[in-house]
Image: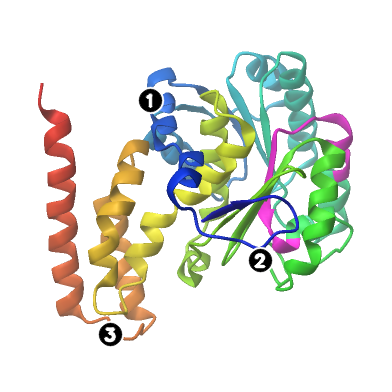
Amino acid sequence: MGLSSPGSQPRNLREKEALALDWKLWDRIAETHPLIHQLTNVVTVNDCANITLACGASPVMADAPEEAAEMAAASDAVVINIGTLRQDQLDAMARAGESANKHGVPVVLDPVGAGATRLRLEAVDRLLKRVKFSVIRGNSSEIGTLCGRRSGRGVDANLDDLDSLLPSIRNLAKELQTVIAVSGPVDYVTDGKQEAYVENGTPLLTRVTGTGCMLTAVVGCCLGAGIDPFRSAILSLAAVFAVTVATQTGSHLVGSLLFPVGFSMLYLLGFDLVTGVFMLTPLAWLDRRPGVTWGQILRNWGLVFAGNFAGIFPRSLP
């Protein structure tokens, strides 16, 4: 991970810089138990609701236009995701966003597949004109489309040259007065004045439906807990670190050796890491990652179980 001013090169967090990532902020989610109103797509609605619960927040997935504004006003954050867009849902999104702005409720936008069709492109344009977003999170193609460089095949990213887009992303963040988070092999976050890089990407995450949608839901949880937009984006992206480590076990169980760091981060958030590792390490084997064998996977599961127990036991003491 790294923090820097726009235009500088990414650098690793060290010593005092590490203070920028205060993982105690995660406790705010469980402490405040924010209500997160999510107007999201039907493919991942259950996943987004569950990860919201795992964060310690409370999800409500109301997308009827007749109640969207009222629900948004009563919520602590609003998540808008255009993944399976319908006209009536777009109307509900606009109403919810406007109501949230009126009542001081932060809003996060996930412009899923923004460049894939004219409908999506026009929908995002409509939302940006009517709603002030605290955070906009998307992949490189989606954010590139917002910057005027339309691309994307369906909901997948196909824009690899992120560096050439950085000036446009910074300018867009300034223009919209928002935080823009671009997820990818190296995640990028900026508000136009400051920026951060989170180096934790893995290709395996693209093989699981809804990881981006769930990430946006986590951003909403952070915003709803009162964490500022810039740190909300960084912390949400950085939370993927533990999952990334679990899938990078091709180097003789380096993932197992580093896992306690990721576990500590994700435990503060309240994730059930054992389930994630049980799912992802077989995926690494199926992907024929170098050095991944069933013997190593079973050993890794044992270490993860021990790490979970060791992490939970002290917290269970009076």
Tell which residue pokes out farthest to the front in this image.
16
Question: Which mark sits nearer the N-terminus, 3 or 1?
Answer: 1
Q: Which mark is residue 113?
A: none
Circle 2 sits on which residue?
156
Visual colour scheme = rainbow
Label 3, label 1: how far apart the Cα atoms are: 38 Å
Looking at the rendered structure, the secondary structure element under dot 1 is helix
Residue beneath the point at 57% across and 48% down: 213
Of circles 1 and 2, the one toward us is 1
The amino acid pointed to by label 1 is: Ala
Query: Where is 203 relative to 199, above or below?
Result: below
What element does badge 3 sit on? Answer: loop
The Cα atoms of the two marked residues, 1 and 2, are separated by 33 Å
The residue tagged 3 is: 291
| C-alpha distance separating marks 3 and 2 | 29 Å
Give the residue drawn at x 69%, y 53%. Answer: 112
**Residue 56 in picture, x, y percent from top left:** 39, 29
Q: Earlier in the sequence, mark 3 or mark 2?
A: 2
Identify residue for label 1.
30
Of callouts 1 and 2, which one flags the residue occurring earlier in the amino acid sequence?
A: 1
Q: Is residue 44 magenta?
A: no
In the image, what residue type sits under mark 3? Answer: Gly
Q: Residue at x 49, y 21 (%)?
A: 34
Seen from the viewer's position, the closer of residues 40 and 298 is: 298
Q: Range of the magenta residues?
A: 125-141
- Percent position (x, y) of residue 249? 30, 73
